[in-house]
Amino acid sequence: MTLSTVEPEHATDVGYPLTVPSRPNGPAVRRLLRRTAIGTALFGTVATLISSYSRRSGHRAAALGALVPGGGYIYTRSPFRFLATLGGFAASLVAWFGSGNILAPPLVWLAAALDARRQADRGRATWDGARLAVPAALVTVAAAGAVARRRAFRTAQERGRERARYLATAPRIDPRPKDSARDELSVDDLATLRSLFDRALQPLDRFDGFTKVDQFQPAATRYQLNFLQYALAMSQLHWTPSFSGYLSAAQRNLIDKLTLPPVWRYWAYEQMWGNLSLDWDPMKRDNVMLSGYLGMMLGTYESNTGDDRYRRRGALPFRLGKRTWPYNHDMVSAAVHDNMARSEMTLFPCEPNWVYSACNMTGINTLMLSDRLHDTRFVESVGDEFRRALHDEFITPDGRVTAIRSARLGVTIPMLTSTIADSGLATMLHAFDPELAQRCWTIVRREFVDTSGTEPTIVLRGWDAIDTGNYKKSQVASFVPVMWGAAEMGDTELYDVLAASLDRQSPPTEANGTRWYDELSTNMNAMLAVARFSPPGGFRALIADGPDPATLTGPVLDEAAYPDVLVASARTDGADLRMVLWPGANPTRAHLGIKRLVPGGRYRAQGTVDDLVTADDRGHASVSVDLTGRTEVVLAPDP
């Protein structure tokens, strides 16, 4: 990133308010937890009564197996089967978390209970003490858990009070992109872009250079497509807003790839085993991890280019076998809105049951883009409830944002609320709720990032220590989301420190004009590119503002050969066109296509073979440029 830090005049006022709650959860989560607790207590009571009073050993074994996964094996004196059941149940919970497979845990649990019953019915020796030991152990664990949760809540409250004290005096920020037509992409920026283009411009069914692991979690192809497009959109808005050509074609290719069956087929499985449904419509119910991220792709593309082709009927055909779900941009946005409108917590699930706060930021950003581009009123409809739910149901007692919550049970997985989750969420929330986003970042910057040593260190927790784009252990992958947050919040000093350390610890490979971090996944490389091309407040501007109106009406570079011509800058004031071009490799005479000129208009040209250019009756013109190095090209109306 080459822009300087936030200008001093952008430091406005002091302090971010943080109210420490008197209860650990909001009203919707309390209802879910209360329902879960009542259901569990009733089920446990019935199972305990059966195990205590039934005269049939098989019923006792099944009842104890219903109380605890594998509990029946304690009664039938089968310790190895008990341990195996615990292992299998743990694996089923991973499957539930990873793919929404709600069937796996109860099936493992039920199978063990029925097998213990079979053992007892066949006369296996039993331990009668299990009828007391298993319920007693369960009550003890539940009581210990309740005490631990109460202590954790009080500790979190104290952390929250401490944070509230320093947040009250923290300098407020309002990062905004610098408005300078002289800014241009560097040689390293162009090399990074070439790595993105090489992946984005390949044929629709080719995915060379993509990380291939699974299609359910963060390594999925769809996330790579998402962040590759976000990086190109960020570059287009802030550096080359008057360049369409292969830059726009690459984004369209990434959007179209998202509709291919290998990319979204995962949803058919998740609907079946997560929602127990054969309706494979990819956006009708849940799946914000597709609809929200896709909606942002569609919105940022249309915002930057003015091209509304994805609003046409059936522009996004999701095919699976003989069935097709023909979506378009408007339908994607409406699906996000409708899911939010009927969700008890407004935020709605990715995988069936699991609500990720960060994924839902793409959802609300999709609605913001739709309102700005299409004059819908989606945010007016659900925005207040979204903000209330985010603050009441997803803010932890110490002021952070809960990363994940069960839509059916209300429970969370605390280890996933981490530095990396905080950094990414702060960036993606910045357009909708700038104050909360900036408060989250202030906490991250003060408490979880240390730049005082030889190399910067980040406080890691849970999955922070792996590259989430390939699940490999990594010492530097955690830098990337923090760099994105630093870029967005205008903390270019931190960005530069982390970027330098990343290059020392994991040097990029530079070959054939490209620049790529081989030790990072494709998704992390793409996210790093988003950060690289983002000026302060760049993501917020991408969602909330878009390009200057003159950009969408003034001249645009529409044709340039890739990789022969690299575009470092392309801007217009509505009448002229100013570009900075580089040859892709060897010196070349490049032929450029310009559109949106005044039909029949004459233009003075600088840096081109011909000094005078005349547009045809459609406002199109072709110019030739000799590229031997950095070349400035200007087309201005001939007085």
Image (cartoon, helix red, strand yellow):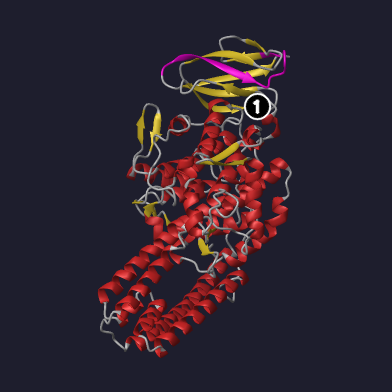
* Residue 105 inside the magenta-drawn segment: no
Q: Is residue 91 above or below residue 425?
A: below
Q: Residues within 10 Å of mark 1 (few under 14, many from 20)?
A: many
**Quarter of the figure with residue 68:** bottom left
Task: Say left or right for 554 vs 215.
Answer: right
Q: In this view of the protein, which residue sits in the foreground, 330 or 434?
A: 330
Q: Which one is nearer the viewer's eye here, 357 or 140?
A: 140
The answer to if 591 sits in the magenta stretch is yes
Vertical comparison of 234 with 398: above or below: above
The answer to whether 52 appears left or right of 430 in the picture is: left
Residue 342 visible in this rendered orientation of the protein: yes
Q: Write down the residue under mark 1.
A: 572
- Residue 398 at what x, y percent from top left? 53, 69
Is 375 above or below relative to 171?
A: above
Q: Tell me what residue is drawn at x 49 percent, y 79 percent.
A: 43
Magenta segment: 586-603
Q: Quadrant of residue 182?
A: top right
Residue sticking out furthest to the front: 122
Coordinates of residue 374 in the picture (x, y in percent) = 71, 41
Q: Three-letter amino acid code at disc 1?
A: Thr
Q: Residue 71's spot in the image, x, y percent?
A: 35, 78
